[in-house]
Structures are given as structure tokens and as C-alpha cells.
Image (cartoon, rainbow, N blue to C red):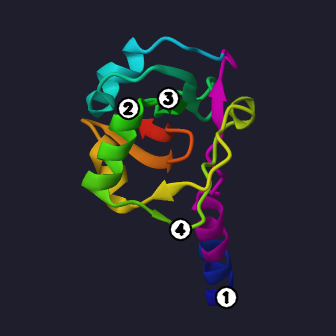
Amino acid sequence: MKWLVALVAAVALVGCQARAEPAVKAGTGQLRTDLDPLLSRFPVLGAPTGARWMSGTFGRADVPGPSTYWIDAVVALDPAAAEQLMTAHAPTAEGGTPDVVEGMRAELPDGPFLTGDALDAAFDHERWHVSAYLDADSGELVLVATGN
């Protein structure tokens, strides 16, 4: 009888464990070029010369609960702003590439990308966490942001 109680407890424990599923970026697929939404979330961008970006939420719309948002952006900086980011945050070429949604992949600059914790931290703002990738040759900055 003890083995039956142990078996039932084990089955219940396994059944109650949440199955980890990878976070899926969902969105409209619309490629946007307006700057105001980016500047309000990431004021350190200053005065970029342009941007291409997409956004949405993680997960499924049919599941209730608070939403976590994402933004994948390629921001064109003037040369002085790109140089200032390199000087202030000392990013290095670590071989990383941005993990953006399919619709943004063709928008990415060629790289190599300069990255680093200090560069990421420069763009973290309020409830947004950012992985930043700077292509020094093109002066374009890729932001992979998550927030709520």
C-alpha cells in the first residue's frame, strides 16, 4: 500500500510541474519607422537619423495575464553619436549577433557588432532591459528589448 501512495504522489508531482516552453515573439509583422515610441522608451538614443523596428508581445494572446513586450530595432546614429557610445561604454567585438524576429533579419547591418554589459545598461530604462549591438562601420545600433 505504501508503494501505491508513493506512486500517486510521484505522478502528481510530475503532472504539476510546468513544462518550459520557449518564449515566442508575437506581433503584427508591421515594419515601423517612426522614432517617437523608441525615443520615449530609450531616451539615451538622443537624435537618431532613422530607425526600422518591429514590436509585439511574448506568448499567446489567448492566455490571460500581464503581457511582456518586445522591440527589435535598427537605429541609424550620426557618426558622433556612435563614437560617443564607443567611448563611453567601451563595447567589444565578442562575436555576438542580434536575435531578432524574422521580419527584421534583412534589416540588420552586416557587423561585426560591438557589445558589452555597459552598452546594454546604457539603454536599460524603467522596466525595459536591452541587449545592444553597435555596428561601428555603418553607425547603426541594434536594440533587442524586453519590457512591461
The amino acid pointed to by label 3 is: Ala
Question: Which circle's residue, 3 or 4, is located before the other in the chain?
Answer: 3
Please identify the quadrant where the N terminus is shown: bottom right
Mark 1, residue position: 3
Is residue 13 shown in magenta?
Answer: yes
Mark 4 residue element = loop
Question: Which circle's residue, 3 or 2, is located before the other in the chain?
Answer: 3
Mark 4, residue position: 94
Q: Nearer the viewer, mark 3 or mark 1?
A: 3
User: Between residues 72 and 111, which one lies in front from this camera angle?
Assistant: 111
- Using the numbered discs, state the Cα–Cα distance from disc 3 to disc 1 in whole angstroms: 65 Å
Spot occupied by residue 94 in the image (x, y as percentages of width and height):
53, 68
The amino acid pointed to by label 4 is: Glu
Question: Which circle's residue, 3 or 1, is located before the other in the chain?
Answer: 1
Mark 2–mark 1 contact, CB under 8 Å?
no
Spot occupied by residue 57 in the image (x, y as percentages of width and height):
55, 29
Q: Nearer the viewer, mark 4 or mark 1?
A: 4
Mark 2, residue position: 148
The amino acid pointed to by label 2 is: Asn
- Using the numbered discs, state the Cα–Cα distance from disc 3 to disc 2 in whole angstroms: 25 Å
